Amino acid sequence: MSGGELRFDGRVAVITGAGAGLGREYALLLASRGAKVVVNDLGGGVKGEGSSQRSADIVVAEIKALGGVSVPDYNSVIDGSKIIETAINNFGRVDILINNAGILRDRSIVKMTEEDWKLVQDVHLKGSFKCTQAAFPYMRKQNYGRIIMTSSTSGIFGNFGQTNYAAAKMGLVGLANTVAIEGQKYNILCNVIIPTAASRMTEGILSDLLFKELKPQLIAPVVVFMCHETYTENGSYIQSAAGWATKWHMVTGKGTILRSSIEQQNITPEHVKMEWAKVIDMSEAKHLNHTQSTGKLVNVLEKLQNNNIDVQEDTFKFGAKDLILYALGIGASVKNSNDLKFLYENHSEFAPIPTFFISPCLIAVTKLNIAEKLSMISKTHYKMRLHGEQYLEICDNLPTSGTLTTTCKIIDVMDKSSGAVVVLDFETFDENSRLLVKNQMSSFILGAGNFGGKRHAGTGVTMTANPPNRLPDSSMQYKISDDQAAVYRLSGDLNPLHIDPKFAADNGFKQPILHGLSTLGFSVRAVLAKYANNNPTFFKAVKVRFSAPVIPGQTLKVDMWKEGRRIHFHTSVLETGANVITGAYVDLKNIEAKM
């Protein structure tokens, strides 16, 4: 049916407040597309006074004159069951319910009377509830239904003189949320329309120019599509006006934990004040549905219960430009036709090199104050943090752009006399909370040793593995550009050790050195080229130990040993024979060896 006319043949629609304005436009359009329509309208004034059958009768006559099928209903929405009975008695079913009826009784909060409050709440909120409650059993029995609630920007933002109306309209959002949850398993979808249209209710309130452009017939197609069987959104809020539409979301900030452990049952107002800037920070706000919101709170409690309060989160945005820059930083070249898919965003097989996904954890770790975390075990100021080991595991299909969230926590600390080894675990998720990759990083902190800690790693640390005791099965060489470190650092590791000669000399190096992760990238490229036909989807995991630095301009030699789907490798500098990566391996999902 894609591309064809959206039809409603065999469907029955009930529209409240359909005697004029938006309701009339919904009724006429649905009827013209084959729906049988119940035109409900009490026929009262904009303030809810009086009643008349004339409004509903006129719209029904219009529909019939155009060849459609329709019946009138004159009941108040408070008697929602009677309105639904009209549909059942005449057509035997109800498929669509548009809760559109409304009145206004605007007064400032001080002057608002009990009657003003009750009438507006009854028509908007209680009436929508009663009609939905009456229609729901029929929809559930037929395993199909489309329900629309009508909210307003006044409900979302408030509006002077409309405490009754605004409260009712925001109440309709909550009503719709719950109906969407209860109806989903029965294929009953409930959504919210937030319209701004010229009507009896807005005449005299809006400017003449705005009033003329806010034509109800420009909103009706949006609502009618939301009532169609091909519409699959549930629990959404759609705003529409003057031929424009958009989706609204409620969002939640990242928040902050206000206690240090599950045992701490009391916090002070003074502590809340101190942390308030984090509470109200919306710079990393996200849209969460009901289930995700509950899951977020459970996750916080689990962190507290497991004493994982040190888990930190960081966000990482990337796109094609970042993937291409990274590929250049680890030596990909247009001279190699197999590398073009890593360098050209419009390539039919454009894909990330998997080791790019170490980047989110590298950025996250720069924000984790390791010195502060180590202060509890060592009073020595460390001189330098060196990257000791790295593990990366791919958990799901990798995207070519997005915003990722990475959690980071210290899982182990070892005392190596001259320094401390700190092991950090990372998990990286996409916008849909899909776990993409796991990383583990071991850092050697010079000057932070001799604190009386353990010497060996715990069970949670992924270990390196030595290659078989035989000559390599294959080898590859890469000449490193003099500018390689200058290019690689643009992927996020801006440590001056890799670019500033004076900084390098002050830290014991004759000249700036290449990033260990760039050397890792070159090495993994060799494995993919030799045993995976350069197909990044074959890659599963990599583990390396960094044993010595590489100077830009030197030549890397990557020796490889194939053991099933595990490729052991050893990387050295050709000119000096120095081993720069040891105990390393790549696990592949498939082998496609290059002979």
Image (tube, rainbow, N blue to C red):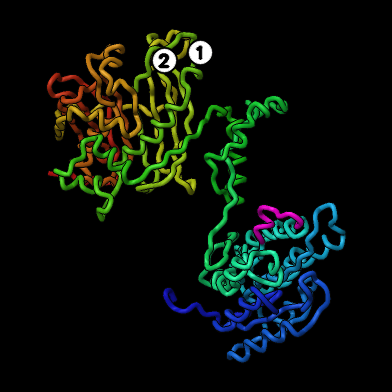
Closer to the chain start, of discs 1 and 2, is 1
Q: What is the number of the mark on residue 377? A: 1
In the shown orientation, is residue 438 left or right of residue 207?
left
For the residue pair 515 and 458, the one nearer the viewer reads as 515
Question: Which residue is nearer to you in this view: 227 or 524?
Answer: 227
Q: Is residue 397 left or right of residue 198?
A: left
Alpha-carbon neighbours of circle 2 within 10 Å: few (<14), some, or many (≥20)? many
State which quarter of the image contains the N terminus: bottom left
Residue at mark 2: 420
Pointers 1 and 2 in contact (C-beta within 8 Å): yes
Q: Amino acid at mark 2?
A: Ala
Q: Amino acid at mark 1?
A: Ile
> Can the viewer see residue 198?
yes
Q: Is residue 577 above or below residue 95?
A: above
Residue 432 placed where, x, y %?
A: 48, 49
CA–CA distance between discs 1 and 2? 10 Å
Q: Does the magenta-highlighted stretch encompass residue 157?
A: yes
Please say if 154 is above or below 287.
Answer: below
Q: Nearer the viewer, residue 195 or 516?
A: 195
Residue 360 position within the rendered picture, expressed as x and y whole percent measured from the top left: 40, 36
Dot 2 falls on a residue whose secondary structure is strand
* Picture quadrant of residue 587: top left
Quadrant housing residue 564: top left
Label 1 crowd (10 A; few <14 / some 14-19 / many >=20): some
Which stretch did the figure color magenta? 152-162
364 or 443: nearer the viewer: 364
Q: Secondary structure at mark 1?
A: loop
The picture places residue 513, in percent across and down from the top left corner, at 25, 21
